[in-house]
Amino acid sequence: HVQLVESGGGSVQAGGSLRLSCAVSGVTLTNACMAWFRQVPGKEREGVASIDSAGKTSYERYVKGRFTISQDKAKDTLYLQMNNLSPEDTAMYYCTIRELQTYSGYPKNCVSALRAGFNYRGQGTQVTV
């Protein structure tokens, strides 16, 4: 039974910081891509950041330089450190996993695979700025 449980969301003033966590269980993270995306009601979801099994990270332009994605493999936990938050960052934030072997496209990397979809997703944590 796969579970992704996000935590760390809340309300913060503009310029403030939050650290989101995503505890993962029930799935092997070897060769898995992990990512955060966010969604505002009535709008399409948008990517935030991703990290592959080798630790290579990728960020969307609107969070680059402010957000940092990381993972603790020993704890099977994904993090998102968010600094200098602005009202435009207000959204529900979701943790996702894409198993790279389930992606048949090209190039076969996490950025491309995650844009095509994900295998597992958490319930989300609300961030309000």
Image (tube, helix red, strand yellow):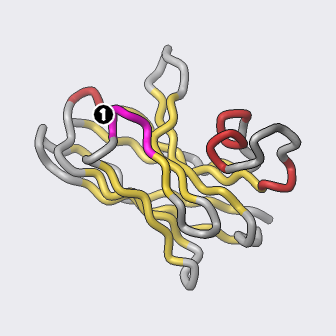
Q: Quadrant of the N terminus?
A: bottom right
108 above or below 26? above
Residue that lies at the very extreme toward the bottom in this rendered image: 74
**Going by the image, does 40 lie left or right of 25?**
left
Q: Quadrant of the C terminus?
A: top left
Query: Where in the figure is residue 98, as x and y percent of width and height?
Result: 72, 51
Quadrant hosting residue 40: top left
Q: Residues within 10 Å of mark 1 (few under 14, many from 20)?
A: some
Q: Which type of secondary structure does the marked residue at label 1 adopt?
A: helix
* 60 within the magenta span: yes
User: Dot 1 corresponds to which residue?
Assistant: 89
**Going by the image, does 71 lie left or right of 109?**
left
Highlighted magenta segment, given as a residue range: 59-63
Query: Where in the figure is residue 60, as x and y percent of width and height?
Result: 43, 37
* 2 within the magenta span: no
The secondary structure making up most of the magenta span is loop
16 above or below 39? below
Q: Residue at x 54, y 27 (%)?
A: 45
**Is residue 36 at least partly visible in the picture?**
yes
**Which amino acid type is marked by label 1?**
Asp
Query: Where in the figure is residue 19, as x and y percent of width and height?
Result: 31, 59
Identify which residue, 120 or 62, lies in the foreground. 62
**Going by the image, does 71 lie left or right of 63?**
right
